[in-house]
Image (cartoon, grey):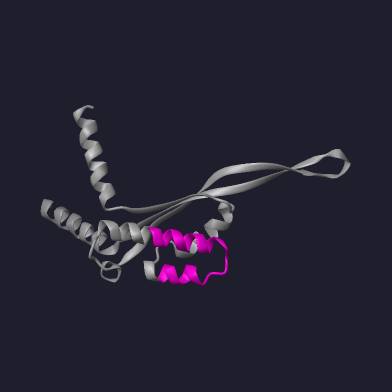
Amino acid sequence: MGSRKHIRAEQRKEERKTLYIARLRNVPTSPRKMRLVADLVRGMDVEQALGVLQFTPKEPAKKLYKLLRSAIANWEVKNEGARIEDNQLYIKEIKVDSGRMLKRIQPAPQGRAHRIRKRSNHVTLILGNRLDSQAAEDKVETETTESK
């Protein structure tokens, strides 16, 4: 491996240490239905999002609730001894992508057939820390003012 690739790989490795990711794959609901619930909690604080998902009557909300709990557990593994309330965790990014599609045939009148597409989706949830992002913004501001 060349030195540039090695340096870039090390940078990516360091960036991933501050990301707290949870993924849910091949969920047997359509991406459109899952996006409705994902849009409810995008950008919210973790405690508030847990409450919203817990009391949302839609079926994908249960799966997103478990996914958010998993992302919180991943955060706790990387930050032992830290409290969620003190770190102001929030949902930095949530993506719902289309998964595989099962294709079935529905008999129709006069010897025809209609195709049924049973859709699935993949959900990626990334947590962020508002304190870390504010510290990074302050650092950038001080660097720009010093260079002037």
Q: Is residue 45 visible?
A: no
Give x and y (percent) for residue 8: 24, 37
Is the residue 15 above or below the residue 133 in the image?
above
- Residue at x 15%, y 53% (from the top left corner): 143
Residue 62 is covered by the magenta coloring: yes
Q: Quadrant of residue 141?
A: bottom left
Lateral position of residue 92 relative to residue 98, left or right: left
Lateral position of residue 101 relative to residue 62, left or right: right
Query: Who is closer to the viewer here, 25 or 145?
Result: 25
Give x and y (percent) for residue 100: 56, 42
Residue 55 is covered by the magenta coloring: yes
- Residue at x 45%, y 61% (from the top left corner): 66
Is the residue 117 above or below the residue 33 in the image?
above
Q: Which residue lies furthest to the right in this view?
A: 110
Query: Who is closer to the viewer here, 128 or 139?
Result: 128
Q: Give the range drawn in magenta.
A: 48-70
Give x and y (percent) for residue 4: 21, 31
